[in-house]
Image (tube, coloured by chain):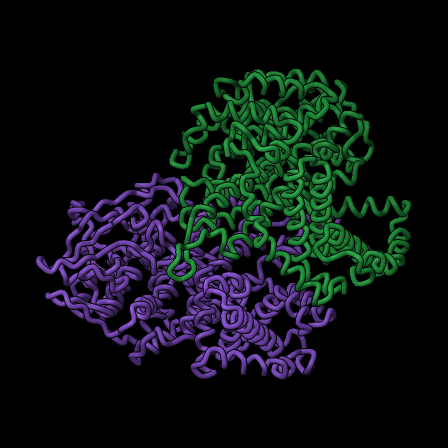
Chain colours: A green, B purple
Amino acid sequence: MDQKQPSSLARYLDGEFWEIKDAFRDAISKCDLFQSSSYELTLDQSRDLTAERLYHILRLPFMKEHLQNQLKEKQNGFINKSWGITELICSADMATGVKLGVVCGLYGGAVNNLGSPEQKMKWYLPVSELQFTGMFAMTERGHGSNVRGILTEARYDQYSQEFIIHTPSEDAQKMYIGNAMKGNYAAVFAQLIINAESQGPHCFIVPIRDQDGVMWPGVTTIDMKHKEGLNGVDNGILIFNNVRIPRENLLGKFGSVSAEGLYSSPVVSKSRRFNAMLAALTPTRLGLTVQAMAAMKLGLVIAVRYSHSRRQFGPKDQEEVKIIEHQTQSLRLMPHLAAALALTFTTRYAAGLMDDALCQGQDLQSNRALQALVAGLKAYSTWENLACLQDCRECTGGMGFMMENRIPSLKCDSDVFVTFEGDNMVMLQVVVRELLAQHTKQMGNNLVMGLIRNWTSSVSDSLRTSFLGFSVDKVGDLMFLLKALSYRERVLQRSLASRLYTKIEKNKDEFFTAWNACLHHVITLAMAHIHKVTLEQFALAIQECHIKEDHAVLTKFCLLHGTSLVYQERAWYLEHNYLTAGTSRQIRSQVLNPFQEGISMHFSVFSVT
Amino acid sequence: MDQKQPSSLARYLDGEFWEIKDAFRDAISKCDLFQSSSYELTLDQSRDLTAERLYHILRLPFMKEHLQNQLKEKQNGFINKSWGITELICSADMATGVKLGVVCGLYGGAVNNLGSPEQKMKWYLPVSELQFTGMFAMTERGHGSNVRGILTEARYDQYSQEFIIHTPSEDAQKMYIGNAMKGNYAAVFAQLIINAESQGPHCFIVPIRDQDGVMWPGVTTIDMKHKEGLNGVDNGILIFNNVRIPRENLLGKFGSVSAEGLYSSPVVSKSRRFNAMLAALTPTRLGLTVQAMAAMKLGLVIAVRYSHSRRQFGPKDQEEVKIIEHQTQSLRLMPHLAAALALTFTTRYAAGLMDDALCQGQDLQSNRALQALVAGLKAYSTWENLACLQDCRECTGGMGFMMENRIPSLKCDSDVFVTFEGDNMVMLQVVVRELLAQHTKQMGNNLVMGLIRNWTSSVSDSLRTSFLGFSVDKVGDLMFLLKALSYRERVLQRSLASRLYTKIEKNKDEFFTAWNACLHHVITLAMAHIHKVTLEQFALAIQECHIKEDHAVLTKFCLLHGTSLVYQERAWYLEHNYLTAGTSRQIRSQVLNPFQEGISMHFSVFSVT
C-alpha cells in the first residue's frame, strides 16, 4: 500500500485528527533519530537516544502548539487529538511514547488537572518550551496497587511556610518512577499532615535536580537499571530526607493550606477527595489503551504481511501455500485484528466522552460509566495486546524472535502495560465498583432494596433476550451477538450483587473477605462489561462508515469480533441455557469460517509509519 | 526451606537421579561464573560468558563421564539422567543449557544416533574432551517447519571421493544455527545427490572453522546478532559455496555411499528413511520439555514466594493480606504449579520409555505412542511454560518486570521454545499423524474400514463412560477426571477420522486441503491426547509415592491439574452432554476451591539452585 495515498479505510480508522497524524508520520519518517534501532545500545545510550527523540518531538511546531493548548480549559477534541499523536509516536518507538506519557500525560496531567491556573503556567508551560521535564511519583515500594496506603509524608511547617516531604521507611520509597534519572521536577503524592493530622494523599511539586544535574537538598535517586523492555525510559527510586518545598507547591484544586496552616478543600470526605484526584487523572489512563493499540497494530501489520509472503507445506507436487492459508494461522491472527479495530473505535468513543464532559465543565468522577469504561479498556486492551503480540511472535516463527523484526521489542516494551498505571486486576475491580454503584443509583439509594428488586425481575428479563426464548435472531447476526454479550453482563452483575448481598447483609462477612471470595466473579463481570462495550462501539462505528466497500470489510470484522467474544465464553452460555449444544457448535464453525470468505486478505487496514 | 536438607517431596520430585542433580547444584552454586547476571553485558560479552559457563560444566568430572557414556550403546537410564542434568543447568542459566543442548544434544545426538561407532569416536569423543564443539544445521531460510523440503545439496564427486556441500539459493541458507559463530563442526542436513538423483536429506559433518578460527574453504557464517532472549547463544547463518568434505563425513546409519558412488540404505523408501532419521533424533526433542520445565519451576518458585511475602489490600483497619490470599492470585499460579508437577512425572515416563526401548535395541520410529507423546509434550510444555511465566510476571507486578528478578529473562529466553526444534503447530500435527496411524493399525491395515468400524461403535462407547450415563463417579474424583479426558480424546479422534474420511474418500479432496480444513480439529485432538497422558502419569506417580504427607500434597495437585484441564474444556463437555450445566458449575467451584483448603501453602516443592 502506498503510504502517501492512504485508503479511505485507513483514513476512516485514523479518524477526525488524521491530519495531525499524517504530519507526525511525515515528521518521524524524515527524522534520522528514528531510523536506527536501539536494542544493541547500552542502557545509557538507549536512554540518551530516547531523550533526544523526545526533545525532537517536543520541538515540532505543531507539537508545541498542542502542548500549550493543554494549558487552556475546554479545548474541544483535545483528548482525542492527544491520543492520536501518542499512538503515532508509540508505533515509531514505544520508549519515546512512554517517556512522553510520563512528562506530558502523567506529570503534565497532575499539574493541569490538580493545579491552579498559576501553577499550570509555572510548572507546565516551561515543559512545552523544553526548559525542564517532570516525573510522576505515586507508587511506593509498599503500595503499588493500594495507593490509598502510601506512606510518604508532607508535614506543613507554619514557621517557614514550607512543606517537609519525607520518606519515613523503606516501604515509602517512590519506586519505578519514569524519568527519575533525568527529570527536574516530580509530582509527588504524599499524606498531607497539618498539626499531626493527615488530610489524606495530596500532590506536591518537588524539585529533584536542576538543569545542571545538581540535586535538590535531601533528595536521593537510585537507578533501577535494566528491565524486560522500555530500557530507553530511566526508571528509578526517589527517597526524600526532610525535603523542604514552598507552600505554593501543593497542587491546590482539591485541597490547599493557608499560610497559617488552615486546611480547606471543596471535598469534605478524605476518601472522596482522593477519589476525585484519581478521577481527574482518568484521561491519562486511557493513554495505556492507546499505547497497547499502537503495539498490537504494528505487530499485526508485520505478522499478517509475513504470513502472506511466507510459504510452507502444500498439496503434493504443487507449490507450497502461503502460511496465512493454514487454517490455524488465520484463526490466531484475524480475531486480534478484529479486536484492534474494536479498540480503535471504543477508545475514540471514550476520549470523545471525556472531551465532551470537560468542555461542559463536568467532573469526571461522577461519570460512573466513563470511569468503568476507561478502567476496563485499560485492562482489556493491554491483555489483548499481549495475547496478540504473542500470537504474532509465534506466527512469524524464528523471524519473530529476531530483534530486527520488532515484534520481540514490542512484546517486551508493552508487557508492563498490564501492571503500571493500575494493575489490570485492580482496574477490573474498579470497573465493577463503578457498575455496582451505578446499579445502586438506578435502584434508588438503598443498595439492598435495589439488589432485591433487580434480582426478582431477572427471570422474565432473561427470557426476553434469550436466544432459546426468542429465536428470531440468527446466531452470528450482529443483533444476536450484541444481545448475548449484554445478557451475560446483566446476569453476571445480578448474581454478583446477590452473592455480595448474602455474604455481607445476611452472613455479616467483612466487606473485603466477601469481595475477595467473589474476586473471580468480579473479574469475569468486568471483562463481560468491556467486551459488550467494544462490540457496541464497533457496531456504531460501522453505521457511520458511508463508503460501501469499507462498510463491508468492517462489518465482517465486527461480526468476527462479536463471534469470537461469544465463542470464548460459550461454556457460560451453555451453562445458562442461552446456547444449545447445536448453536454453540454453530458459533464455533463461524469462528472458523470467515477465512473461507477471504477475510484474511484485508491486512493493510492500518497506516503505520 | 534449607536447601542442604531437601524435603522428602523435593527428593521424590528429583527422582532416581537425585544424586547427580545434587552434585550439579553444588558445583554450580560454588562456581563464580554463575554468580553474576548477564543482562547488562554486550552481545559478545554475553556469548563469551555462556561459552565459559559451558566449558566449566563440560570440565566437571561427572559431566565428562556422563558424556562419554553417550558413546556407549544401551546405557540404562542414560536419557533420564541427561535430562536431570539439563534441567539443573537450565535453571542456573538458560543460554548455557541451550548451548549445551546444541553441542551435546543436537550435534551429539546427530553423530551418536545417525553415525557409525567409528564416526562417534571421531566426531563426538573430542567434544567430551573439549577439543572442539559442534552445531546442528537443519533449518533453512525457506524451510523451517517443512524440513523435508530443504534445498542444500550434497553432490557426490566420485573422482575425489568427496561430497560437495552447496547452498544453491538464498532460501537454502542454513539459518538460526546455534553456536554458528564459535563452533568448529556442523551436522548439516542436505539432499544427497548421486548422478543427479536425490536420495533425500542426509546428515553430513562439515568443518566450519578450526580451533584458531580459520574458516574452512567455501564456508561463510553470518551473525544473526540480537534476539528476544538467549543472547548468550550465538545464532548464525551458514552458507556453503561448493564445500568439499571427505566421503566418510556422511553419517551412515540410514544410508551410505561407496567409493564408487553406489548408494545403499537399510530403508528403501526415501520418505521412510528421512522419518527414521528424524525419529532417531526424538530423544533430543524431549529436551525442550525439560528446558521449559526448568523455566516454569524457577518462575513459580519466585512468584509464589513473592506472593507469600507481599501484602496489599485487606479488611478495614487491619493489616493488609498476603497477595497469595487474593482469590485470583492463587487461581492464576496454582494450576501452573500442578501442571509443572504433571510435566515432571510425564517427562520422566517418556524418558523411561526411550531408555527401555534403546536398551532393548528397538527403533524409536515404530513406537507410535512414544512419538506422539514426545511431540505432544514438546508443544504442551513449551506453551504451558509461557502461560505460566506470563502469570508469574504479572503476579509479581513491577518487580516481575525488573531483570534482576529473573522472570523477564526466563520469559524472553524460553519464548522461542514454542518454535524451535519443531514449531508447536507442526508438533501437534505429528501427534495426530501418529495417533491416526496407531488407530489404523488397531483396526487392520485398511484405513477406511478401520474408521468406519470404529465410528459405528462410538455411540455405545460414549454411553459407557459418560458421566451422565453412569453417575457413580463424583465430579472431581480422579477417576471421573481421567475418564472425562480419555472420553474427549476418543470422541475427537473418531470425529476427526470421520471428517477426513468424508473429505478424502467421498469428496476426493486432496489430502493437504482436507487436512488443512480440519487443522483446528487436529490441534484440539493433539492437546486432548497430551492432557490425558499428563493426568494419567501424575496419577501413577502418586501411587508410587509412599510417604503419607507427600502423597496427600501430590493428590491435591493432581486433582487440581485434572480439574483445570476439564474446566478449560467444559464448553466441549457441555456441547457433548458429558457435563450438565450443574456439573459444569461444580467443576468451576472446584477450580476456585482448593485455595480454601490451603493448597497454596505448598510452595516449596521444587529444589532450585
The extreme left residue here reads: B159
Task: Tell me where residue B134 sits by quadrant.
Answer: bottom left
Left or right: where does residue A584 sit relative to residue B255? right
Q: How many numbered marks are there? A: 0
Residue drawn at x 60%, y 50% is: A335
Q: Is residue B33 visible?
A: no
Residue A123 coordinates in the image, percent (x, y):
63, 19
Q: Tell me where residue A47 sits by quadrant.
A: top left
Who's the residue at 68% across and 69% down the image?
Answer: B574
**Which is nearer the eye, A576 or B18?**
A576
The x and y percentages for residue B53 are 30, 52
Residue placed most toward the observer, A235 or A82? A82
Can residue A532 be seen here? The reply is yes
Q: Residue at x 21, y 65 (%)?
A: B251
Classify A453 as above or below A377: below
x and y percentages locating residue A231 in the rendered image: 47, 36
Q: Kindly identify the residue that appears in the image at 38 percent across and 71 percent down.
A: B351
**Relative depth, front residue between B250 and A201:** B250
Q: Is residue B395 above or below residue A301?
A: below
Q: Is residue B596 above or below residue B237?
A: below
- Nearer to the camera, A226 or A196: A226
Task: Report x, y in % for residue A91.
Answer: 53, 34
